[in-house]
Amino acid sequence: MIVIAQTMDLAAIGPDDLVGDQCSGEGRLVISAVKKHSARGGLGVDIDESLVRLSQQNAVGAGVGDRVRSSLPAICS
């Protein structure tokens, strides 16, 4: 999580930002961007359908499910 925090600080993520993450896995980066750095929203994309579901569950569990989405890339849907 230290690398994610440093990345968010370096990018100066704030309330006007929408954050995207390709190969997002369980959604740590976009969830952190929204929850801890006040990003307006986040979109995580992964080719593994089980990780997409897990990412969305993690976002809901973190209280940001209304502002974070996870999806398969268009080519996989």
Image (cartoon, helix red, strand yellow):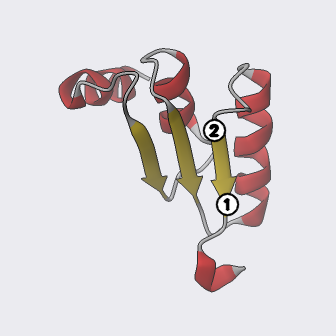
In screen coordinates, is 77 left or right of 9? Answer: right
Residue bearing the label numbered 1: 71
Q: Quadrant of residue 60?
A: top right
Assign the N terminus to one quadrant of the image: top left
**For the point 40% across and 22% down, which residue is it?**
15
Assign the C terminus to one quadrant of the image: bottom right
In screen coordinates, is 56 left or right of 8? Answer: right
Mark 1 Cα within 10 Å, few/some/many (few <14, many 20+)? many
In the image, residue 50 sits, relative to residue 34, either above or below, namely: below
In the picture, the disc for residue 53 is none
How many circles with numbers are drawn on the protein? 2
**For the point 67% across and 60% down, which residue is it?**
71
Residue that lies at the very extreme toward the front in this rendered image: 16
**For the point 71% across and 54% down, which residue is it?**
51
Residue bearing the label numbered 2: 68
Question: What percent of the width, then of the height, locates residue 28?
Answer: 55, 34
In space, the residues marked 2 and 1 are separated at their CA atoms by: 10 Å
In the image, residue 56 sits, relative to residue 64, either above or below, namely: below
Mark 1, secondary structure of its residue: strand
In the image, residue 19 sits, relative to residue 21, either above or below, namely: above
Mark 2, secondary structure of its residue: strand
Question: What percent of the width, then of the height, locates residue 13?
Answer: 32, 26
Residue that lies at the very extreme toward the left in this rendered image: 10
In screen coordinates, is 59 left or right of 61? Answer: left
Question: What percent of the width, then of the height, locates residue 49?
Answer: 75, 64
* Amino acid type shown at disc 2: Val
**For the point 80% across and 37% down, which residue is it?**
57
Question: What percent of the width, then of the height, locates residue 26?
Answer: 64, 43
* Amino acid type shown at disc 1: Ser
Q: Are marks 2 and 1 in contact (CB under 8 Å)?
A: no
Mark 2 Cα within 10 Å, few/some/many (few <14, many 20+)? many
In the image, residue 13 sits, relative to residue 27, either above or below, namely: above
